[in-house]
Amino acid sequence: MSLLFLKLKNTSSLRMKKIQVGFLLSYDYEKLKYAIPPVYREADTIFIAMDHKNRTWSGEKFEVEPDFFNWLKEFDVDNKIVIYKDDFYDSSLLAIENDNRERHMLSLKMGIGNWLIQIDSDEYVLDFKKFVSDLRKYDSYLDNPKENNIQIAMYSLNLYKYVDNGILFVKTPTKAVVATNYPNYKVARVTRERIVYTQNLLLHESIARDEEELIFKLDNWGHNIEIQDKEAFLYKWRTTNKSNYKERENFFYIEPEKWKHLEFCEGNSIEEIRKNINLEGIMPSKFFIAKKNFGQYFKHLFK
């Protein structure tokens, strides 16, 4: 009887340790056509969360063309994609609080006991198979996630602006926490628990979009009240181009110095940029990541 119990327990544990990927559908939903394919094969289930009244975190309405759902149905050959509709807008909350709330609700839907991965619609993972392989090294943390909360990070290569025959991107990648075993989010996807860094990269289209769409994003995303001088930021964004980007610095929308310098890559689409971008000197080294993980381990050892 005890052997049978252990066998059933182990089988149940294996069933729970899935690769669950979640996306948030909003005004830039068309970008999901580029964000979903890189993760599709390795994911067990893909959840797409959308507000039941098509509202942003600031309460603005948006429309979704029926063709998008037709594409989704045709693309989902393995029946992995689940549309999760719910009331994700609370008028008493700030945009960033609605952001946290939706991500928490989505992760509960994906199921604690699995790897809870959230990727934004404008983020394109370069090698999801490798990321899953790195993630699986920490499967033991799924056994008692509430008591052993960790976060798993990639690095984000932030795309700044499309210019003639290419893209301007931020030279130094930034941390991108995308996975956790327990979703006690404090700011967007961040739980402020121990971070495990991995040598993986995603392209973040971020503010690389046309001006009208960019302004709508600045007014409706979770960071909408953090931008100190939107007009100054937009002026620099409008006037930065392929000819003058090397003469300028400090491009981030909140603390400008966080995006110090830009680089250029040829390509007029995400597919071309993925092929053309030179990752030499961009991808953090294994030694650098080992140092980061060593520091994180001791930082959270006695918490």
Image (cartoon, helix red, strand yellow):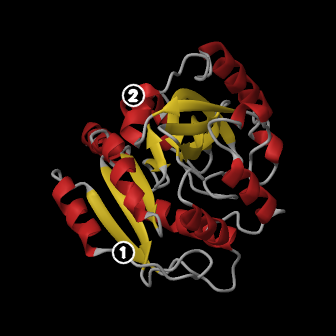
Are there few (<14), some (14-19), or many (20+) residues within 10 Å of tag 1?
Answer: some
The quarter in which the N terminus is drawn is: top left
Q: Residue 169 versus residue 3: which sits nearer the camera?
A: 169
Query: What kind of element bears circle 1?
Result: loop
Please tell me whether mark 1 or mark 2 is closer to you in this view: 2
Q: Quadrant of the C terminus?
A: top right
Find disc 1 in the rendering and name its residue. Answer: 64
- Closer to the chain start, of discs 1 and 2, is 1
Q: Report, in whole angstroms, how far the alpha carbon at label 1 lies from the one at label 2.
A: 30 Å
Question: In the image shown, does 156 or 44 lie closer to the viewer?
Answer: 156
Amino acid carrying label 2: it is Lys
Q: Which residue is mark 2?
A: 275
- Residue occupying image coordinates x 65% and y 18%: 290
Q: Is residue 279 above or below residue 63?
A: above
* For residue 275, above or below residue 251: above
Left or right: where 119 falls relative to 91: left
**Residue at image location 26% in from the left, 74% down from the top:** 66
